[in-house]
Amino acid sequence: MFLELIGTIFAGIAFAGVVMVANKFTGGRLPRWAAPVAAGLGMIAMTIASEYSWYGRTAETLPEGMAIVQEVESRAFYRPWTYAVPFVNRFAAVDTASVRTNQQVPEQRLVDMYFFGRWSPVSKLPVAVDCAANSRASLADGAEFGDDGQVLNADWLTVSAKDPIVRATCGV
């Protein structure tokens, strides 16, 4: 966040500098407000470019084995251009390298799911996936394991076989 702020400030200075140099070459014919307006436009352009490139930059740095399972696009009235071209400001990824199985319950797998958001810390959630029943459950609230390894007290959500979390976890 701090580096983006510094980059935005430098973009404003650079745009104002270009207008000031152009004003020097034109013999001072540009209006006095041109440099501050150019600085503002440069800062806005840098902010927009940073918003649109965040997802790509973050996704490229994910380690091997991370599968992106959901993207959340942002649209806002105070950013009217986002209605034409929305940008991704949150996404979820499953760490396929962390898939754990139990010999007694081979159709169920445990996996770590990570939630990434612009301007927010990364969150981790353990998820149980039943590959045979095409269902999944969050293990955050009161889920326990029985003596046989079966997940107890979990709210299972039945999903389709095309669910990205099930597909990434079960390797379908």
Image: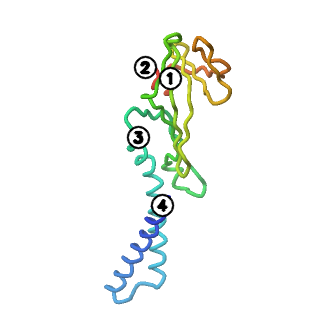
Which residue type carries mark 3? Leu
Q: Which residue is mark 2?
A: 172
Q: Are marks 1 and 2 in contact (CB under 8 Å)?
A: yes
Neighbour tally class for label 2: few under 14, some 14-19, many 20 plus, Cα within 10 Å: few
Q: Which residue is mark 3?
A: 62
Residue 47 is marked as 4
Q: CA distance from mark 2 to mark 4?
A: 39 Å
Q: CA distance from mark 3 to mark 2?
A: 21 Å
Which residue type carries mark 4? Thr
Secondary structure under tag 1 reads: helix
Which residue type carries mark 1? Val
Residue located 53% across and 43% down the image: 122
Neighbour tally class for label 1: few under 14, some 14-19, many 20 plus, Cα within 10 Å: many
Q: Which residue is mark 1?
A: 166
Q: Residue furthest left?
A: 25
Q: CA distance from mark 1 to mark 3?
A: 20 Å
